[in-house]
Amino acid sequence: MEKQQVKKILSVKNLCVSFTSDEATAQVVNGISFDLLQGETLGIVGESGCGKSVTSLSIMRLLPHPAGEITDGQILFNGENLIQAEVSRMQEIRGNRIAMIFQEPMTALNPVHKIGKQIMEVFRIHRPELKKKEAIQEALEMMQKVGISAPEQRMGEYPHQLSGGMRQRVMIAMALVCKPDILIADEPTTALDVTIQAQILDLISEMQKDLGMSVIFITHDLGVIAEICDRVIVMYAGNIVEKAKVDKIFEQPYHPYTSGLLESIPKLDSVPKQRLRTISGSVPSHSEMPKGCRFHNRCPNQIPECSAKPPELEEIAAEHSVACFNPCG
């Protein structure tokens, strides 16, 4: 019996994004390609400045204008190229078929409007056929689903009256009321304490199963990736340096950068007071990228070839690709 092929709901192909300032133009995403499968959770991991959030904003067509610009590539959502979509078409898709939750809900929510008004705005834009009473009922049901206590009371409150975890639950409710095909979660737990973080991760996983949606989860934390993701993409300085199923990455990381990220995670069996290993240096400025492999000046495995030309992303094992001339393992 043939194995049923899982549908690709999103395909990003050779995506290039540039930002222009008064001084220069810099390419911040450098020809990346990946697929998102129906019902899976795909993690995108890397340090700040590696292009993770720019990638997600490109998918949503929310790059700051005129500084940010998609200069090449395709973003295919169910076969439709979003880069070529009209503004009106993107307004239909954004928040409806593809939704997004952000790192800090206090800046994403409007501080001068009550929670209820902000949730109802989603219905007004994307489901205008609903009567007000029906929309309120659906909003209350979704708020209950995401664990917001006393939803009727919360509808009449302002963002500053809620805790950080409760504000993030409101953002998740707003993202899910239209039952999207894809949810993009951009560092949604970074500003929360560990206990609330675990609750939000469980909530996203639970809602994914309930709605059958696909999730792109963006984070700098491989521990979070291990918790909820099926596959992972590791980004560095605008490039994909490694991609594989999550268990394969943890079992055998091939790129020195991935290995460094894993070694910086605290372990329960580590020696008390032992210093965590770190990756020396920092992500280079987009206007001053090194030639060759962009990681070579921080890399413990560098060889002469690394500074001469950039490595291609190639399959090194089954469903496991790496861009490195001298991989680990």
Image (cartoon, rainbow, N blue to C red):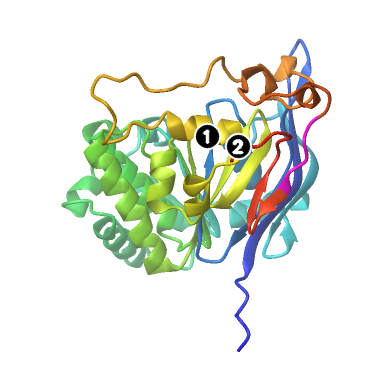
Give the residues drawn in magenta, as a range.
310-314
Horizontal and vertical percent for residue 86? 74, 51
- Label for residue 328? 2
Q: Main secondary structure of the magenta part?
A: loop
Q: Nearer the viewer, mark 1 or mark 2?
A: 2
Pick the front one: 70 or 95: 70
- Number of on-image labels: 2
In the figure, is residue 283 to the left or right of 159? right
Residue 269 placement: quadrant: top left
Q: Amino acid at mark 1?
A: Ser
In the rendered image, the quadrant that contains the N terminus is bottom right
The residue that disc 1 covers is 259
Report the residue at 44% width, 39% height from top. 222
In the figure, is residue 73 to the left or right of 273? right
Pick the front one: 291 or 317: 317
In the figure, is residue 328 to the left or right of 115? right
On whether residue 313 falls in the magenta region, the answer is yes
Q: Is residue 108 above or below residue 74?
A: above
**Can residue 61 be spotted in the picture?**
no
